[in-house]
Amino acid sequence: GDTKHSLSLSLSSLYCVSSTMAMKASVKGKFDAGKSTGVGSLAFNAGDIKLRATMTDATLVAGPTLNGLSLAVEKPGFFMVEYNVPKKDVRFQFMNTVRIAEKPLNLTYIHSRGDNRTIVDGSLSIDPANKISANYMVGTNNCKLKYTYAHGGIATFEPCYDLAKNAWDFAVSRKVYGGDMLKATYQTSSKLLGMEWSRNSKYTGSFKVCASVNLAEEVKTPKLTAETTWNLEM
């Protein structure tokens, strides 16, 4: 009786540990006309805390080496600490939500110790269709203000004003073919026009195909890139 009881207790304890330490792996590949790159990550969920290791192709191709390796500890929605191993640089990120007139204001504070750079990001949801957001790099004039309008959960319109460049950027996206997304962007300062087609599926992974052309260039040659991501849960 004691043997069966201890065996069942051990199995239940093992199940609890394995369920709380669920592991997720993802591999992302990026391809363009000149080169291809890859990024892989392993994430472990330990209760509310997520542990993640990220590696680029530079970590494995010439190695293994520490190039491109970063380690992170995260509590989603609250904080993240990321350590870049080869650069010996630490990046802190803190998230919080406060309410202004019963509207949620999401705030994110990001500080990189290596280049002593601090960014504050905030977004205020006025209603399900309208959102205002701002991104500011402390101590500089780098500030972007963006308005997002979502129409019926199908189309999104996003004008963005860049204070540093004194210029507007525009983005329009629309859902097509069920889960696919088409997006068009235009940067007025650089006259860069972009088109993007993406799909996100938890069964087959996700992919994104981008085409961009600089309208200011005399020879308007499109630049093509493709990204694909595979996810695996264990």
Image (cartoon, grey):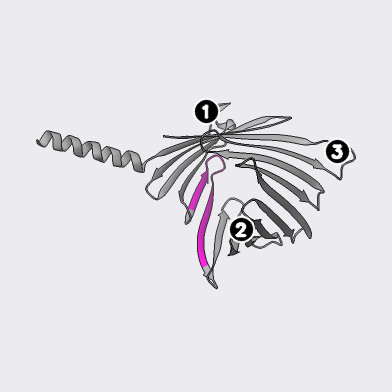
Q: Give SS at disc 2.
A: strand
- Give the side of residue 176 with respect to residue 107, left or right: right
Q: Which residues are magenta?
A: 80-98
Q: Which residue is mark 2?
A: 119
Q: Earlier in the sequence, mark 2 or mark 1?
A: 1
* Residue in the picture at 77% in, 57% down: 168
Secondary element type, mark 1:
loop
Image coordinates of residue 222 in percent, x first then y, are 80, 36
Q: CA distance from mark 3 to mark 1?
A: 41 Å
In this view, the mark in front (2 or 3): 3
Magenta run includes residue 92: yes
The amino acid type found where label 1 is placed reads: Pro
Q: Nearer the viewer, residue 65 or 154?
A: 154
Residue 67 shows up from this direction: no
The numbered mark at residue 64 is 1
From the viewer's perspective, is residue 192 above or below residue 132? above
Give the label, 2 or 1, closer to the camera: 2
Q: Amino acid at mark 2?
A: Ile
User: Residue shown at 90%/40% (left/top)?
Assistant: 218
Residues at circles 2 and 1 in contact by the CB criterion of under 8 Å = no
Distance between mark 2 and mark 3 Cα atoms: 35 Å
Residue at 51% across, 63% down: 97
Which residue, given by chain and number where applicable, does mark 3 sit on? 220
In primary-sequence order, the first of circles 3 and 1 is: 1
> What is the residue that sits farthest to the right in this orientation?
218
